[in-house]
Image: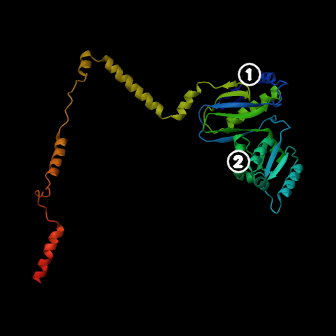
């Protein structure tokens, strides 16, 4: 039994689900399907009670490696000072051999990534050539601007590794054979790859129990977290292996609104008391409480009168004198012309 924060898995039930999934995958793998992969991924689908408030990436170590030995792995390293990209590549190859790391198939320094894999097609080929990408912690923050959208659309972003670690082989093996669960704050579902179809039923069951224990202990949430857990492959239906009790709803409601519950209960009590007093009252009182109709008052015409008075005032403004027919009013120019000679005579 795997227990933690209210999550308990029945190993016998989980093993039955794994065997049913493996039987389904065997029926789908026919010799005529040339392009079918040798092994298919088996994943766990977690459904949470509520949407997380923060995004989180949980690293899950697994007791049995969920990647076959044939997987191609690429490592991005930093540029060593006073070394070319070729010399840097040789330096890290020797370092991995000394530490006992044999799973890395290609090493690409940061300078080579910027120059050789700058075109769009080169990045596209790089994604398709390898199954997993690792990166040195010292250059991890510089990679997204040079990798492009292909890595993140296919969920192939590099995983961080400390190349200065004293136990480098153990750390790299944990990262390669382990898995990651990305908890997104945009929804309540998240998925993690935990096995492949070439593993035995007991190995898959062990990985499922280890993954559930790690997720429940590391996820940032209080109270009951996991609502449902399903087991599925790329082509199969999701098989339920865990369902939470509905009694967890009460604890979730108390966590969300702990202060509102007593207020709601008090309001309900008040409403119930008012209903009881109305029911016990006399019939005459109920008739007296019926509201009577009140005539609607007609709107006053004062604002209209005020508007009219303003209009009349505007209309009463003095108008310029209208000249009679045949006679034209003297213009300003003629008046000025008459005044000028008068001033000269005075002088």
Q: Residue at x 26, y 19 (%)?
A: 286
Query: From the viewer's perspective, is the residue at label 1 or at label 2 nearer?
Result: 2
For label 1, the crowd category at 10 Å Cα-Cα, with few meaning under 14, some 14 to 19 and many 20 or more, is few
Counting from the top left corner in percent of width and height, residue 80 is at 81, 59
Q: Return the residue at label 1.
A: 13
Q: Where, quadrant-wise, is the N terminus in this rendering?
A: top right
Q: Return the residue at label 2.
A: 148
Counting from the top left corner in percent of width and height, residue 337 is at 16, 73
Secondary structure state at the residue bearing disc 2: loop
Counting from the top left corner in percent of width and height, residue 165 is at 80, 51
Q: Where, quadrant-wise, is the C terminus in this rendering?
A: bottom left
Farthest residue to the front: give it. 326
Instruction: Using the rendered image of the protein, determine whether residue 135 is visible from the camera's viewpoint.
Output: yes
Please identify the quarter of the rendering in which residue 193 is found: top right
Residue 288 vs 297, above or below: the answer is above
Please identify the quarter of the rendering in which residue 334 is found: bottom left
Farthest residue to the bottom: give it. 347
Mark 1 and mark 2: span between their CA atoms? 43 Å
Residue 89 in the figure: left or right of residue 323: right
Q: Residue at x 74, y 22 (%)?
A: 13
For label 2, the crowd category at 10 Å Cα-Cα, with few meaning under 14, some 14 to 19 and many 20 or more, is some
Instruction: Using the rendered image of the protein, determine whether residue 167 is visible from the camera's viewpoint.
Output: no
Are circles 1 and 2 on residues that touch, CB within 8 Å? no
Foreground pick, 56 / 157 = 157
Foreground pick, 262 / 310 = 310
């Amino acid at each position: 039994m795997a227990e933690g924060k209210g999550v308990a898995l029945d190993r016998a039930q989980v093993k039955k689900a794994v065997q049913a999934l493996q039987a389904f995958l065997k029926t789908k793998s026919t010799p005529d399907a040339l392009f079918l992969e040798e092994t298919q991924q088996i994943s766990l689908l977690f459904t949470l009670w509520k949407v997380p408030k923060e995004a989180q990436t949980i690293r899950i170590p697994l007791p049995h490696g969920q990647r076959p030995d044939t997987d191609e792995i690429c490592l991005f390293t930093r540029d060593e000072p006073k070394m070319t990209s070729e010399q840097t590549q040789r330096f890290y190859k020797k370092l991995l051999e000394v530490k006992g790391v044999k799973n890395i198939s290609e090493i690409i320094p940061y300078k080579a990534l910027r120059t050789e894999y700058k075109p769009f097609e080169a990045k596209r080929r790089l994604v398709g050539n390898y199954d997993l990408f690792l990166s040195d912690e010292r250059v991890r923050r510089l990679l997204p601007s040079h990798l492009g959208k292909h890595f993140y659309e296919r969920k192939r972003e590099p995983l961080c590794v400390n190349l200065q670690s004293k136990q480098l082989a153990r750390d790299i093996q944990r990262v390669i054979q382990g898995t990651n669960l990305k908890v997104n704050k945009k929804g309540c579902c998240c998925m993690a790859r935990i096995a492949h179809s070439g593993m035995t039923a007991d190995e898959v069951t062990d990985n499922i129990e280890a993954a559930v224990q790690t997720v429940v202990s590391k996820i940032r949430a209080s109270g009951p977290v996991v609502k449902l857990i399903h087991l599925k492959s790329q082509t199969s239906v999701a098989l339920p292996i865990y369902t939470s009790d509905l009694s967890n709803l009460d604890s979730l409601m108390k966590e969300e609104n702990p202060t509102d519950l007593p207020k709601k209960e008090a309001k309900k009590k008040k409403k119930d008391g008012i209903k009881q007093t109305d029911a016990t009252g006399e019939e005459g009182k109920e008739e007296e409480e019926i509201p009577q109709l009140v005539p609607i008052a007609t709107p006053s015409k004062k604002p209209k009168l005020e508007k009219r008075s303003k209009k009349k005032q505007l209309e009463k403004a003095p108008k310029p004198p209208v000249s009679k027919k045949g006679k034209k009013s003297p213009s300003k120019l003629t008046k000025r012309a008459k005044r000028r000679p008068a001033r000269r005579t005075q002088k």
